[in-house]
């Protein structure tokens, strides 16, 4: 084995990291991330990286959401576009309808009347979920709100009452990950 290959293998083993091949074959949690009109390539890359960390099933990039490969996405994804399964879908309404027909609960992460606080939502291990994260300014598109089964939000006490979409997704995905692995 070449010296560089041995060093890389030792790094992976010392950090208990999976190889790309092992990751792709590993079991994922039953969660799909759907990005609705997310415009920032840095946010998209960050969401790929977070999805890799929490073994998310798949990411759907919808509407104007930029797709790999792109240098600006790679800056924050750090290779996660290679490990996380993803697909671009232009027709978000059709996609949501198809996912509902496959048995997924559609969860909108959005501050709306009647939304449930993240920590109060009972995550069911027997269920499959789609978590929708919307545009950085406008949130989830009005045209799909009626297709969403439940809305959750992260409680906040500051003056802004909003979080960057990639930070928000990190918090929500961690909550799903830890609950589904209990």
Image (cartoon, rainbow, N blue to C red):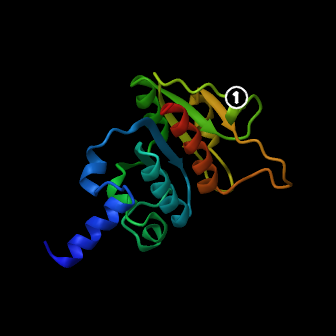
The answer to which of 168 and 69 lies nearer the viewer is 168
Kindly identify which residue carries mark 1.
120
Q: Quadrant of residue 68?
A: bottom left
Q: Residues within 10 Å of mark 1 (few under 14, many from 20)?
A: few
Q: Secondary structure at mark 1?
A: helix
Question: In the image, what residue occupies the spot 75% across and 28% down?
Answer: 114
Residue 84 coordinates in the image, percent (x, y): 37, 51
The answer to which of 28 and 61 lies nearer the viewer is 28
Residue 74 lies, with reference to residue 151, above or below; the image says below
The answer to which of 138 and 77 lies nearer the viewer is 77
The reply, left or right, for residue 136 in relation to residue 162 is: left
The reply, left or right, for residue 50 in relation to residue 116 is: left
Residue that sits furthest to the left in the current view? 1
Q: Quadrant of residue 144?
A: top right
Residue 11 coordinates in the image, percent (x, y): 34, 67
Residue that sits furthest to the right in the current view? 159
Residue 93 coordinates in the image, percent (x, y): 49, 36
Question: In the image, what residue occupies the spot 57% across and 27% down?
Answer: 123
């Amino acid at each position: 084995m070449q010296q560089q290959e041995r060093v890389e293998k030792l790094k992976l083993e010392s950090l208990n990291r999976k190889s790309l091949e092992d990751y792709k074959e590993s079991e994922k949690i039953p969660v799909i991330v759907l990005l609705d009109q997310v415009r920032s390539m840095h946010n998209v890359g960050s969401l790929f990286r977070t999805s890799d960390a929490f073994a998310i099933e798949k990411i759907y990039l919808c509407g104007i959401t930029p797709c790999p490969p792109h240098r600006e996405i790679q800056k924050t994804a750090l290779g996660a576009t290679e490990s996380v399964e993803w697909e671009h879908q232009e027709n978000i309404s059709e996609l949501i309808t198809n996912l509902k027909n496959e048995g997924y609960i559609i969860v909108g992460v959005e501050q709306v009347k009647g939304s449930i606080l993240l920590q109060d939502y009972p995550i069911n291990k027997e269920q499959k979920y789609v978590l929708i994260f919307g545009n950085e300014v406008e949130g989830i598109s009005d045209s799909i709100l009626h297709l969403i089964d439940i809305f959750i939000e992260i409680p906040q006490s500051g003056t802004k009452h909003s979080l960057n979409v990639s930070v928000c997704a990190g918090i929500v995905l961690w909550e799903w990950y830890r609950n589904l692995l209990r």
